[in-house]
Image: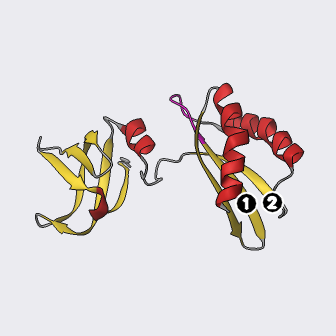
């Protein structure tokens, strides 16, 4: 499967970027009886259905031409989504300065959940500034989920 993801990225990423979008991720998974190839894209101005259609119409013929995926599949081009967990350094870079919610596997300083603005990150930690102005560094290995804060 990782070979499929790698080949899809090699083909699709330059095209997606030439269209002015950020190539975020590839997923190839079975859902029910169908195989779904999902390409996730992002843009500073957001992603609409028209953007997903544009990328799909441009990438699909290239994938069909190479014909390296044995299974019959459906191509899905998707936006990153507001509730998607932040996992990679690119995710943290893209979200720098934004508010996040962090859920931990076990309490740190008596708390299992933190919210705040990302002020720094590394391969091992994320640093946030909470609403009360405190800077908190959290070991990424301790974080069960980090996602953008959404006000309802």
- Which range of residues does the magenta coloring cover? 41-46
User: Left or right of 110: which side holds 84?
Assistant: right
Q: How many marks?
A: 2
Prevailing SS of the magenta stretch = loop
Neighbour tally class for label 1: few under 14, some 14-19, many 20 plus, Cα within 10 Å = some
Q: Residue at x 22, y 44 (%)?
A: 128
User: Looking at the image, which residue sits at the far front?
Assistant: 3
User: Which badge, 2 or 1, is on the more N-terminal residue?
Assistant: 1
Q: Quadrant of residue 111?
A: bottom left
Cβ atoms under marks 2 and 1 closer than 8 Å: yes
User: Left or right of 119: which side holds 42?
Assistant: right
State the residue position of label 1: 36
User: Left or right of 90: which side holds 15?
Assistant: right
Q: Quadrant of residue 11?
A: top right
The answer to whether residue 16 shows anywhere in this view is yes
Label 1: element kind: strand
Q: Position of residue 116 (x, y in %)?
A: 24, 46
Label 2: element kind: strand
Q: Residue at x 25, y 51 (%)?
A: 115
Neighbour tally class for label 2: few under 14, some 14-19, many 20 plus, Cα within 10 Å = some
Q: Position of residue 93 (x, y in %)?
A: 39, 37
State the residue position of label 2: 73
Q: Residue at x 85, y 46 (%)?
A: 66
Pick the front one: 55 or 139: 139
The answer to whether residue 19 shows anywhere in this view is no
Pick the front one: 150 or 74: 74
Tell me if residue 104 is in the magenta stretch: no
Q: Position of residue 56 (x, y in %)?
A: 76, 41
User: Left or right of 134: which side holds 100?
Assistant: right
């Amino acid at each position: 499967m990782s070979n499929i993801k790698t080949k899809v990225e090699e083909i699709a990423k330059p095209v997606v970027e030439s269209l002015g979008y950020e190539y975020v991720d590839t997923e190839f998974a079975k859902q029910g009886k169908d195989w779904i190839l999902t390409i996730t894209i992002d843009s500073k101005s957001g992603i609409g259905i028209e953007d997903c259609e544009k990328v799909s119409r441009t990438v699909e013929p290239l994938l069909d031409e190479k014909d390296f995926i044995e299974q019959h599949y459906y191509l899905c081009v998707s936006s990153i989504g507001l509730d998607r967990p932040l996992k990679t350094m690119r995710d943290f870079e893209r979200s720098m300065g934004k508010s996040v919610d962090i859920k931990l596997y076990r309490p740190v300083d008596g708390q299992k959940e933190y919210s705040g603005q990302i002020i720094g990150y590394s391969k091992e930690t994320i640093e946030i500034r909470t609403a009360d102005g405190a800077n908190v560094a959290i070991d990424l290995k301790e974080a069960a989920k980090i996602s953008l804060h959404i006000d309802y």
